[in-house]
C-alpha cells in the first residue's frame, strides 16, 4: 500500500511538469500565428455554440440565431467604423439588399441550396457596397453620415416602387428550407433529438458568424488592417507611406457591406419575411449603437452589442410584466432599458463593454498574470 | 499565453468527452409523435393564448387598445367561472408593427410561453410573416385582426388560420353595388393604400363601378405627403372619392382636401373611419388649426359591422360598457376596445364549442363546424366552414353625422368572388345573453 501511494505521488509530482511541457509545445504550435490562433478559437467557438444550442429550447435557439445575424452585421460595421474611421448610418439598407436577395432566391418549388443563397445575398450586397463605397470614399464626417443616411431611408422605398416583384409594403414571405437529412442525422446521432428549424438556423447563423469573424480578424491583424488603421489615424501620414486612401476606404466599405448582406440573408430566414418595415432607419441606428456599446473596432464587442440587441428588450419586457406593469408600459420598458444601458456605458465605460473588460484585465492591480509569471 | 492555452486544451477535452457521452446515449430509432390532438397551453384550470400587437411605434395609436379590450372581457369571463372551469390567460407581445419583431415575439409566444392558440394577431404584413410558421407548428391562428383575403380563402393551405372582420373585397363589392344603384352619375375616384387592403377593395369595387371610375390614386404607408394624389383626384373631376385608408391617411387626405378646397362626397373604409380617432389625428396633424374633427367627417359614408361607441344604447354596447367599467384600466371605452371585446367574445364561443377537453385540432374543427352559427355582436354571420375561413360576411353602409353613423342600407351580406349581395339582418338582431357570456354547445 505504502509503496503504491508513494509511486502515485511521485508520478503525480512528475506528471504536471511533463504535461505542461507538452501543452506548451502544442500551444506554441496552435497559437504560433494569428491565423492558427483564430482557427483554434473558431473551432472552440463552434463547439461552445453547439453546446449552447443543444442545451436550450427552440425559443432560445431562435434568439441565438437572431444574435448571430446581428453579430455579423455589427462585426462588419465595427471594422468599418472602428478600424477605418468611416461612419455608416445605412447598414440596414445593405441588410435589406441581402434579405431581399435571399427571399427572391428561396421562392419557387425547388430553391437552390441554402449556402448558395447566402453567398448570393452577400455577393449582391458586395456589389452594392462597392458602388456606395466609391462615393463614400470621397466623403468625410457629416457628409458621409448624410449620404449613408439617405441610403437607409431610400432602400426600403425600392420594394414599394417595384411592388410587383418585391411584394410592396407586405414584403416577400420566406419559406425556410427543410433541414437537410445529413444534418438532421448528424445531430440526431450525437444528441438523440431531431433538430427543429430554429436549431438548424441557429447552427447556420453561428457557422456564418464564426467564418465571418475569422475572416474579419485575419483582415484586421494583417496588412489590410494596418492600412485601414493608418488611414483612420492620419491620412497624410498614410498617404506618405504609400497607401492609396480611396482604395483602402472602398475596400473597408465593401467588406462591411458584404457582412451586412450576409446578415440580411440570415435575417430573412429567421424572420421568415423580407419587408420594408423590417429595415427602417432605426435598424441602422441600432446597429451603430450596438457597436458603440460593445466597443468600437472590437469583434468581441460587436458580439456583446448583438447580444444586447437580442436579449435586452425581451428581458426588460418580461421583467416589466412580472412586476405587474400593463402590457403597453412593459413594452415601453424595452427602449427605456436600452437607452439607460447606453447612457451607463457612455458614462462609465466610454470605450465600450469589451474595452472596459480588456482594461480591467490588463490593469496591474486586478491582474493575476504577473503572479502567474512568478510561478513559472 | 501558456496558462491560457492549457485551459483551452482542458476545455476542448471536456467538451469532446461530453459530446462522446451524449453520442453513446443516442443513436436509436426515432419515435413517432402521438396522433392525439395537441393540448399545449391547456392545464386543469387555465387556457393560455397570445397575440401580437403594435404597443409602441407609429401604429400604436388606437391599435394598442385592442388587447386591453380582450383582457377586460377575459377577466370578466374568468370572474364568472371561466370556460369549462378554465381561466383564459391572454399574453400580449409588442411587435411595433415590424414583421421582423413579429417573428421573434411569435417564437416567444409559441415556443416559450407555449400558447394554446394565437388570437387576434394584428396587421397584414406583420401577421403575414408568421402565418406559415403557425400552420407548420399546428397552432390555431384564430381571428386575425386584418381584413386581408389571405387568412381565409385557402383553408386547405392554411388550415389553422381564421379571419374575423369582413374582408376588404366584400366591403368594396357592397359599396360598389350601392353606388351603382344610388349614384349612377357619380364620377368615382379611388384613393387606396398600396397593399392587399387597397387591392382587394379595388377588386370588389370594380365589379360594379368599372365604367364609373375616372381615376385611381394610391399611397404607400409611411409617406405622409398625399397632396399629389388628392390634387390628381381633383383634376380628374371625381365627385365621389372612395378611400380605403388607415385612420392617419383618412385625416391626411381630409386636410389636403381642405387646403385644396376640394369637396367631393367621401367614403372611407371602416378600417379608417373611426370619427373619434380621425378627429384627434386631424387636430394633431394640423397642429390645432382644425378643431371639432369629428364634425369634419359629417356627410362621410362608411360601413359598420359591429355596434360601436356611437350607439351607447345598443344592448351589446351596454354589455361592453359594463365589462369595461368592471375590468377595464380606467380609461375611456373606445371603438378599438369594443373591437377587442367583440373578438374575445367570438374566441370564448370557439373555446366553448371545443368542449371540456379542448385540443388545438379540436378547436379548429369546432370553429369550422359551428362557427357559421355563432351568435354575437357582428351584424352579419361568419362564413366559417371547412371550405372557407373568412370572417363576418356583411356590413351596412352608414353616413356619419356628429360622429354617429346613420343607416343608409340594411345589413348586406356577400362573399368573395361573384357571390350575390343579399339583404340579411338575421344576425343583427342577436342580443347578448343575460350574463354576458355566450353559451355555445360543444361540437360532438
Image (spheres, coloured by chain):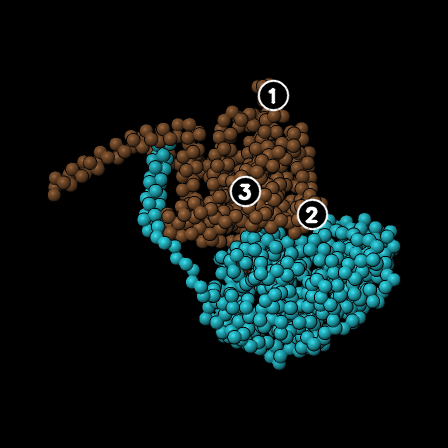
Chain colours: A brown, B cyan
Q: Classify the position of the N terminus of chain B by image quarter.
A: top left
Q: Is residue B23 left or right of residue B326?
A: left
Helix, strand or loop at disc 3? loop
Mark 2 crowdedness (10 Å alpha carbons): few <14, some 14-19, many ≥20: some
N-terminal-most mark, 2 or 3: 3
Closest to the observer, B29 or A234: B29
**Residue under the image location 84 percent in, 67 percent down:** B182
Can you give x and y, in whole percent of width and height, for residue A145 in the image?
A: 66, 36
Residue A112 is tagged as: 3
Please tell me if label 2 and label 1 are on a single chain.
Answer: yes
What whole-number distance in Å separates the C-alpha atoms at marks 2 and 3? 24 Å
Residue B96 in view: no
Can you give x and y, in whole percent of width and height, for residue B148 in the image?
A: 66, 59
Residue A321 is tagged as: none
Query: Which chain contains the residue that carries disc 3?
Result: A
Helix, strand or loop at disc 1? helix
N-terminal-most mark, 2 or 1: 2
Instruction: Look at the picture and state if B283 lies above or below A125.
Output: below
Residue B80 in view: yes
Query: Which chain contains the residue that carries disc 2?
Result: A
Instruction: Look at the picture and state if B183 lies above or below A140.
Output: below
N-terminal-most mark, 1 or 3: 3
Instruction: Look at the picture and state if B85 lies above or below A249.
Output: below
* Residue underneath mark 1: A239
Amino acid at each position: 500500500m505504502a509503496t503504491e501511494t508513494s509511486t502515485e505521488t511521485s508520478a503525480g509530482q512528475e506528471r504536471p511538469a511533463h504535461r505542461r511541457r507538452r501543452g506548451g509545445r502544442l500551444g506554441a504550435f496552435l497559437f504560433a500565428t494569428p491565423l492558427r490562433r483564430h482557427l483554434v478559437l473558431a473551432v472552440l467557438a463552434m463547439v461552445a455554440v453547439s453546446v449552447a444550442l443543444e442545451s436550450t429550447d427552440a425559443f432560445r435557439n431562435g434568439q441565438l440565431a437572431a444574435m448571430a445575424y446581428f453579430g455579423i452585421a455589427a462585426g462588419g460595421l465595427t471594422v468599418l467604423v472602428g478600424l477605418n474611421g468611416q461612419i455608416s448610418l445605412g447598414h440596414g439598407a445593405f441588410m435589406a439588399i441581402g434579405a431581399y436577395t435571399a427571399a427572391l432566391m428561396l421562392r419557387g418549388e425547388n430553391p437552390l441550396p441554402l449556402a448558395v443563397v447566402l453567398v448570393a445575398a452577400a455577393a449582391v450586397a458586395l456589389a452594392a457596397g462597392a458602388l456606395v463605397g466609391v462615393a463614400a470614399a470621397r466623403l468625410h464626417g457629416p457628409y458621409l453620415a448624410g449620404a449613408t443616411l439617405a441610403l437607409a431611408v431610400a432602400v426600403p422605398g425600392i420594394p414599394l416602387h417595384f411592388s410587383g416583384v418585391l411584394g410592396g409594403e407586405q414584403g416577400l414571405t420566406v419559406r425556410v428550407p427543410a433541414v437537410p437529412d445529413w444534418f438532421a442525422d448528424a445531430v440526431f446521432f450525437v444528441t438523440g433529438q431531431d433538430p427543429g428549424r430554429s436549431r438548424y438556423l441557429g447552427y447556420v447563423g453561428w457557422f456564418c458568424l464564426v467564418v465571418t469573424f475569422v475572416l474579419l480578424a485575419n483582415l484586421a491583424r494583417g496588412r489590410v488592417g494596418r492600412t485601414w488603421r493608418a488611414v483612420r489615424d492620419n491620412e497624410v501620414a498614410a498617404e506618405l507611406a504609400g497607401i492609396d486612401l480611396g482604395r483602402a476606404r472602398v475596400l473597408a466599405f465593401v467588406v462591411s457591406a458584404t457582412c451586412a448582406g450576409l446578415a440580411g440573408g440570415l435575417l430573412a430566414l429567421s424572420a421568415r419575411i423580407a419587408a420594408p418595415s423590417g429595415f427602417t432607419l432605426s435598424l441602422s441606428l441600432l446597429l451603430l449603437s450596438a457597436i458603440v456599446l460593445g466597443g468600437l473596432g472590437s469583434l468581441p464587442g460587436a458580439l456583446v452589442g448583438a447580444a444586447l440587441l437580442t436579449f435586452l428588450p425581451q428581458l426588460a419586457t418580461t421583467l416589466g410584466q412580472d412586476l405587474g406593469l400593463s402590457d403597453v408600459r412593459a413594452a415601453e420598458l424595452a427602449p427605456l432599458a436600452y437607452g439607460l444601458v447606453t447612457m451607463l456605458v457612455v458614462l462609465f465605460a466610454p470605450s465600450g463593454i469589451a474595452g472596459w473588460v480588456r482594461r480591467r484585465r490588463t490593469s496591474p492591480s486586478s491582474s493575476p498574470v504577473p503572479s502567474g509569471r512568478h510561478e513559472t | 499565453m501558456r496558462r491560457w492555452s492549457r485551459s483551452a486544451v482542458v476545455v476542448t477535452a471536456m467538451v469532446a468527452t461530453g459530446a462522446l457521452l451524449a453520442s453513446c446515449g443516442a443513436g436509436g430509432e426515432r419515435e413517432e409523435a402521438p396522433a392525439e390532438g395537441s393540448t399545449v397551453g391547456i392545464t386543469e384550470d387555465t387556457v393560455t393564448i397570445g397575440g401580437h400587437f403594435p404597443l409602441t411605434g407609429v401604429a400604436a395609436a388606437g391599435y394598442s387598445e385592442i388587447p386591453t379590450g380582450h383582457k377586460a372581457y377575459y377577466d370578466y369571463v374568468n370572474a364568472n367561472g371561466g370556460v369549462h372551469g378554465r381561466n383564459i390567460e391572454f399574453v400580449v407581445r409588442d411587435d411595433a408593427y415590424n414583421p421582423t419583431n413579429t417573428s421573434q415575439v411569435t417564437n416567444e409566444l409559441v415556443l416559450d410561453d407555449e400558447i394554446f392558440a394565437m388570437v387576434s394577431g394584428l396587421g397584414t404584413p406583420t401577421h403575414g410573416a408568421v402565418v406559415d410558421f403557425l400552420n407548420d407548428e399546428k397552432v390555431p391562428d384564430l381571428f386575425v385582426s386584418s381584413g386581408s383575403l389571405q387568412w381565409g380563402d385557402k383553408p386547405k393551405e392554411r388550415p389553422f388560420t381564421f379571419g374575423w372582420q369582413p374582408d376588404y373585397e366584400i366591403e368594396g363589392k357592397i359599396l360598389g353595388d350601392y353606388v351603382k344603384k344610388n349614384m349612377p352619375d357619380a364620377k368615382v375616384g379611388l384613393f387606396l393604400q398600396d397593399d392587399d387592403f387597397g387591392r382587394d377593395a379595388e377588386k370588389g369595387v370594380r365589379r360594379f363601378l368599372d365604367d364609373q371610375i375616372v381615376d385611381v390614386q394610391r399611397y404607400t404607408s409611411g409617406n405622409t405627403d398625399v397632396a399629389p394624389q388628392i390634387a390628381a383626384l381633383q383634376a380628374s373631376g371625381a365627385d365621389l372619392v372612395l378611400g380605403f385608408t388607415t385612420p392617419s391617411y383618412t385625416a391626411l387626405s381630409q386636410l389636403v382636401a381642405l387646403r385644396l378646397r376640394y369637396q367631393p362626397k367621401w367614403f372611407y373604409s371602416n378600417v379608417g373611419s373611426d370619427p373619434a380617432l380621425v378627429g384627434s389625428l386631424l387636430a394633431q396633424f394640423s397642429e390645432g388649426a382644425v378643431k371639432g374633427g369629428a364634425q369634419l367627417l359629417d356627410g362621410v359614408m362608411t360601413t359598420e359591422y359591429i355596434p360601436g361607441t356611437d350607439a351607447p344604447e345598443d344592448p351589446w354596447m351596454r354589455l361592453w360598457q359594463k365589462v369595461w367599467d368592471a375590468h377595464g384600466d380606467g380609461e375611456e371605452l373606445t371603438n378599438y376596445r369594443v373591437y377587442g371585446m367583440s373578438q374575445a367574445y367570438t374566441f370564448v364561443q370557439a373555446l366553448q364549442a371545443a368542449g371540456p377537453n379542448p385540443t388545438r385540432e379540436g378547436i379548429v374543427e369546432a370553429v369550422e363546424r359551428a362557427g357559421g352559427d355563432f351568435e354575437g355582436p357582428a351584424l352579419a354571420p361568419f362564413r366559417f366552414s371547412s371550405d372557407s375561413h373568412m370572417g363576418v360576411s356583411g356590413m351596412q353602409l352608414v353616413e356619419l353625422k356628429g360622429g354617429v353613423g346613420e343607416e343608409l342600407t340594411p345589413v348586406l351580406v356577400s362573399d368573395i368572388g361573384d357571390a350575390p349581395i343579399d339583404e340579411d339582418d338575421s344576425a343583427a338582431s342577436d342580443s347578448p345573453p343575460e350574463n354576458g357570456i355566450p353559451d355555445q354547445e360543444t361540437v360532438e
